Image (cartoon, grey):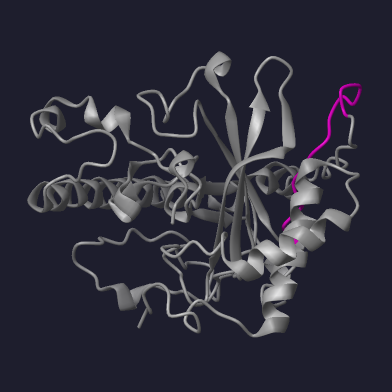
Amino acid sequence: LLPPVAYNPWTDVRKRDDVQKLNVSFPYGRIPDDFQLRIRQHYYAAVSYMDAQVGRLLSTLDDLSLTDSTMVVFTSDHGWSLGEHGEWAKYSNFDVATRVPLIMFVPGVTTYHNWLWESTFPFIDVFSQSEQSFDYNRVVRNMVELVDVFPTVSYMSGLGAPEYCPDVSLQVELCTEGDNLARTFRYKERGKNPELVAFSQYPRPADTPQENSDLPDLKDIKVMGYSLRSWDYRYTLWLGFNPRDFQVNTSDVHGGELYMMEDDPGQDTNIYSDALHSMVMGEMESLPQNGSLQMRLKRQLLYLTAGRKMSGWTSRDKGKGNEVE
């Protein structure tokens, strides 16, 4: 089951005049199905409109002969829940809230022309052309993070990528926690590295949903959800947090989540509390406790997932969860 601390009660959505009229009970009340469909319709319409405007903007680069001297990065700061797990908006550690598009164009690196008069960004009317007309040949299937954007853009601009940040970086003028993705552009088929993970986190004011669970003030934060996403798993620990000194108490565990992505891509079946996981978590007490919180969580994830792979045990074997066709 999803621990209550992980649930986003979408308070900001509830404050809308039209949603208030639905009189949905807090925190787990369900929005009526017909209204859910309208929300999704409006969201998809907004995305389609935005796509068209981005297309017009990029096409203008061609018209002004600026394409060959312009680097383009298209991304976002968060995803959006549209009813998955009974949630709406963006205030959680689920993939639908944390994953974003990341599209990069670097002149002479990510594309090429067969003819001088070819257009790099021809405007495509998404309402008149089918999905099959798009070229997916340059999709890179590697685990990346938004912190990778800055060192990549800096490097591709000829400025060089900043050095990695040390554990204590207060005296360092410029450093990065991200990776330079330049190599990825050339070797996009290097495969899925099981050790690559993406980090995210979200705060909560209490163990159960509150009115301010989606946007707690700093002074009200009592729990922080630290999440790691690998190719195979999403692993989250909700830990005690002190907002005065920004310290986390790794021994104060308020809840946990573990999802096996192959069997459960929608992250619907939390297996964190399963017996095997509890056994492995006990063994992990002997692991080194030095290093940053991110590195310690990564060690836990790698140790935990290795134990599950060795056992050959899955949620389907236990008869839990929904199978995805």
Q: Position of residue 211 (x, y in %)?
A: 35, 24
The picture quadrant where one finds residue 16 is top left
Front-most of residues 135 and 268: 268
Quarter occupied by the N terminus: bottom left
Front-most of residues 305 and 116: 305
Q: How many marks?
A: 0
Magenta span: predominant SS is: loop
Q: Is the residue 249 above or below the residue 129 in the image? A: above
Q: Is residue 115 left or right of residue 286?
A: left
Residue 128 inside the magenta-drawn segment: no
Residue at left offset 50%, top offset 76%: 315
Q: Position of residue 228 (x, y in %)?
A: 64, 53
Front-most of residues 89 and 222: 222
Q: Is the residue 212 above or below the residue 60 in the image? A: above
Q: Is residue 303 left or right of residue 277?
A: right
Q: Is residue 187 visible?
A: no
Quarter occupied by the C terminus: bottom left
Q: Position of residue 316 (x, y in %)?
A: 47, 81
Q: Is residue 170 visible?
A: yes
Residue at left offset 55%, top offset 47%: 73
Q: Position of residue 319 (x, y in %)?
A: 43, 80
Q: Is the residue 293 above or below the residue 240 in the image? A: below
Front-most of residues 48 and 205: 205
Q: Is residue 229 left or right of residue 169?
A: left
Residue at left offset 65%, top offset 19%: 243
What is the magenta range?
A: 169-182
Residue at left offset 24%, top offset 47%: 43
